Amino acid sequence: KIHPTNNTGKKRCRVVLSDSQYFTTALLSTQMADEFENGNINVGTIVQLDNYVCNEVQGKKIIIIITCSRISNNIPKIGNPQNIDNVLIDNNGGNNNMYQQQQQQQQPQYQQQNIGQPQSFMQMQQNQQQQTPMGGGNNNNNNEQIFPVANLNPYQSVWQIKVRVTKKSQLRTWERPGSQGCLFNVDLLDENGDEIRATAFGDAARTFYDVIHQGSVYYISKAKVKVANKQFNKLKHPYEINLDENSMVQQCSPNEEGGIPQITFEITPIMKLPDLLKQYESNGTKYGLVDLIGIIFEVGNVEMIDTKYKSQIPKLSIWIIDDSNSAVQVALWGKRCEDFNAQLGTVFLLKGAKISGWNGVSISVNDDTFTEFNPDRKESHKLLGWWTNSGSNLQNINYVTNKFEKGAGGGAGGTKSSDYKPKMLDQVLSEQIGMNGKEKFKTTALITFFRQNKKPWYPACPGIDPNDPKGLRACNKKLQEDGDQYICEKCNGTFPQPNYRYVLSFRASDHTGEHWMTAFDESANRILGYSATTLSNWLDEDNNAAFQAVFEKANHRHYNFGIVADVQSYNDNTDNVKLTAQWCEPVNYAKHSVDLINKIEQYENL
């Protein structure tokens, strides 16, 4: 056992290995030293070296055992092994440095190490010599040795990798008492499809942030490899790279990029997200990472969320659906939220999104998540075909996120379904719902008629609400047209084009009665399936057929509505109740039938 000479307290053990012909000195890695301490590995143990490196230290070859498997214990010494160092000296005329002699010969082509296959020390030494990367720094070229990402470890001091940047985070800053700094990270992919994360801090982050670009291929060397922090790094590789001021990063020329695959995805269908989450939870983790693709069919409003650091961060909730007819809520945070401008019906591709069990199953997009809208991929084309043919009907959707317990994005202000008491439409009159102040209820009703005596939208201000101290919330005040411009009286802005928002009026009925309802932009988007701006453009283009087809398709469909009832006075001082649809969703007939059967059984048991 080697006692630590610094304050790290890391345990290291030196052992002597023999293959019955030769013996040599080896070091156990920190994790394998625990096996020695526990007695699982001891004198007389036969082991298989699963992962190892062979370094030259002061002219001698030292094996560093990263991981090994125990075959059997308490085996007596086999054969009469010789010291491999003495054999090397005899075989090379007193020269212990075989590597120097190899340099005088033709450089052998790289052969990947056969991890897990028992070898004699001579074979191990030859493999190590073949794996030693040549060169590095700024003089990279196609003929130099490239080290595979899968074999990177803290015990290999000299290496060079050729990788594609598949994901690049934002440059993040932090400031704590006594310290401040910045960092960013990238995910790297080599020709074998193996990935590893690299992180740069401080000056190195500022240097490399503008040098490294997502999608490009680079030679990287002279960086430190350390154990991956799995709290933040969910890649499969056990290690990660730290880039510092001395690290070398050089972009490959276009003709050198051959062999490095493009960004790879392991797309999980939305309907299988609950099963994936169970796998993570069974492993003792509350969340994991997932790749998925879907069509955006609902977009909420930006809301400000308080953080544990007593600050606020913007959040935007959207809903996506795939051809399994399953939907999930996706939360965008920070700058991702502020930059979002995708339209309904857009294909949304995500890599490395966070999946958690909040509210059933939910997806969160942060700085480390790769996103792309309408990607040119076969999965995207297939999904768009499904959406055009049948998916946009939004019928019988399987929501893997609890639909009525979402925050912003549901229009219900983050309230739960339990806040809306079930009612029939005739109860609005019989119980005078809303006549004594605002009341909430939910109901299932059929849309029977859309009021179209005027355009069901208004020109909204796309500027920033002057009353929002964070400067993130849209103004949405009705604009006044002034020649070829639009003027906002609230924020005093002038705009060439408005942002049209719905004020949709329709009649809905159930088996007890009917009532007029109003749906604003979010709920109306859900009902019609197109934005108000899209419909306005169709009218400007005299595409009346497409305009009318939207309403014909949306008519005579059942929806679950979350309603706010409130009294409204007209010019003749007559008080009427106005019903506003705060949220809505197409009826899942299978689930609705089960609910009705349960209610009938409860009624029979009275």
Image (spheres, rainbow, N blue to C red):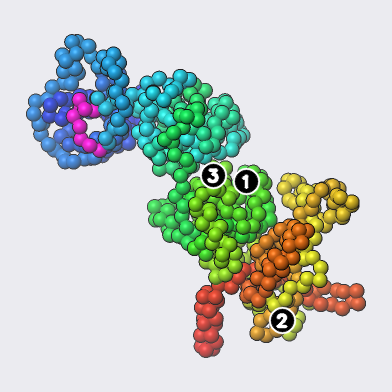
Q: Is residue 62 left or right of residue 297?
A: left
Residue occupied by mark 2:
514
Q: Residue, x 20% and y 32% (percent of image)?
A: 119
Amino acid carrying label 2: it is Glu
What span is in magenta? 116-125
Count up the numbered dots.
Answer: 3
| Residue 328, placed above or below residue 553 | above
Query: 35 or 197: which is nearer to us?
Result: 197
Residue with the mark numbered 1? 336
- Label 1 element class: helix
Residue 220 in magenta stretch: no
| Image location of residue 2, percent across then percent down | 29, 26
Q: Amino acid at mark 1?
A: Arg
In this orientation, does residue 62 appear?
Answer: yes
Residue at disc 3, secondary structure: strand
User: Which label sits in the foreground, 1 or 3?
Assistant: 3
Q: Earlier in the sequence, mark 2 or mark 3?
A: 3
Which residue is depicted at the point 64% across and 57% down?
Answer: 344
Q: Which residue is mark 3?
A: 370
Q: Badge 1: few (under 14), some or many (20 or more) residues near its Cα, within 10 Å?
A: some
Instruction: Kindly check if marks 1 and 3 are in contact, taking CB atoms under 8 A apart as contact.
Output: no
